[in-house]
């Protein structure tokens, strides 16, 4: 097990030496520790995951849908654990390995927490954009809203901002939407 000491840059090799389940992500060559999430975060995550899972089953979609913790390696200095991710069936064999995801999922959903919001809104968003995550959804339990950022010509644009009693509509999964009033109840 790696004893976390302060050093200038960490790599995936350092990250892989951490004990399994250690509460870290590797963001821009820095090991970022996160406390466990609050109960509301977990409830929202479960509701979103269940909603997507039910949709995929109804559509007979055999894509890869998982929730945290699941390592996603973007490069030697960036290994994230998004709250929820989806990879279309046609890309599963390209990205899913025995130990982690290697590359950009089609959809990443992050639920903001006070301790990690700055990373989700800035650094992680920049990395997701750089490596081509097609749809990045940010859920804000405090403001009770959600933003869907979509990739166009390699750059994110705000495709939709949904408020607490509106629906957030996916681009990657046509016909799928999240009812925010049920999400935040």
Image: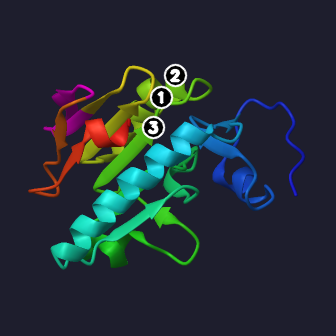
Secondary structure of the residue carrying numbered label 3: strand
> Which residue is drawn at the image coordinates 24% and 70% (left, top)?
56
Secondary structure of the residue carrying numbered label 1: helix
Q: Position of residue 50 (x, y in %)?
A: 37, 61
Residue 155 colored in magenta in the image: yes
> Which residue is drawn at the image coordinates 25% and 45% (left, top)?
135
From the viewer's side, name the closer residue of 43 and 105: 43
- Say whether residue 129 is visible: no
Q: Which residue is mark 2?
A: 118
Quadrant containing the C terminus is top left
Whether residue 154 is situated above or below residue 64 in the rendered picture: above
Q: Nearer the viewer, mark 1 or mark 2?
A: 2
Q: Would you say the residues marked 3 and 2 are in contact, meaning their CB atoms lie under 8 Å apart? A: no
Q: Position of residue 69 (x, y in %)?
A: 58, 57
Secondary structure of the residue carrying numbered label 2: helix
Q: Which residue is mark 3?
A: 111
Label 3 vs 2, first from the N-terminus: 3
Question: How many circles with numbers are drawn on the protein?
Answer: 3
What distance separates the C-alpha of mark 3 from that of mark 2? 12 Å
Q: Would you say the residues marked 1 and 2 are in contact, meaning their CB atoms lie under 8 Å apart? A: yes
Mark 1: few, some, or many residues within 10 Å (few <14, many ≥20)? some
From the viewer's side, name the closer residue of 33 and 12: 33
What distance separates the C-alpha of mark 3 from that of mark 1? 15 Å
Mark 2: few, some, or many residues within 10 Å (few <14, many ≥20)? few
Residue 121 colored in magenta in the image: no
Q: Position of residue 18 (x, y in %)?
A: 79, 55
Q: Which residue is mark 1?
A: 123
Magenta residues, start to end: 148-164
What distance separates the C-alpha of mark 1 from that of mark 2? 8 Å
Q: Left or right: 143 with respect to 123?
A: left
């Amino acid at each position: 097990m790696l004893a976390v000491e302060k050093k200038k840059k960490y790599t995936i090799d350092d990250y892989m030496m951490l004990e399994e389940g250690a509460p870290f992500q590797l963001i821009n060559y820095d090991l970022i520790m996160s406390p466990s999430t609050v109960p509301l975060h977990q409830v929202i995550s479960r509701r979103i995951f269940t909603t997507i899972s039910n949709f995929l089953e109804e559509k007979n979609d055999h894509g890869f849908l998982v929730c945290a913790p699941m390592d996603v390696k973007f490069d030697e200095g960036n290994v994230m654990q998004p709250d929820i991710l989806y990879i279309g069936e046609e890309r599963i064999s390209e990205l899913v390995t025995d130990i982690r995801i290697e590359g950009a999922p089609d959809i990443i959903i992050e639920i903001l927490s006070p301790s990690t919001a700055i990373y989700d809104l800035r650094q992680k968003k920049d990395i997701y954009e750089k490596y081509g995550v097609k749809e990045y959804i940010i859920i804000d339990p405090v403001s009770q809203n959600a933003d869907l950022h979509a990739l166009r010509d390699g750059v994110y644009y705000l495709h939709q901002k949904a408020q607490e009693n509106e629906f957030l509509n996916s681009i990657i999964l046509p016909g799928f939407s999240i009812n925010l009033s049920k999400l935040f109840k």
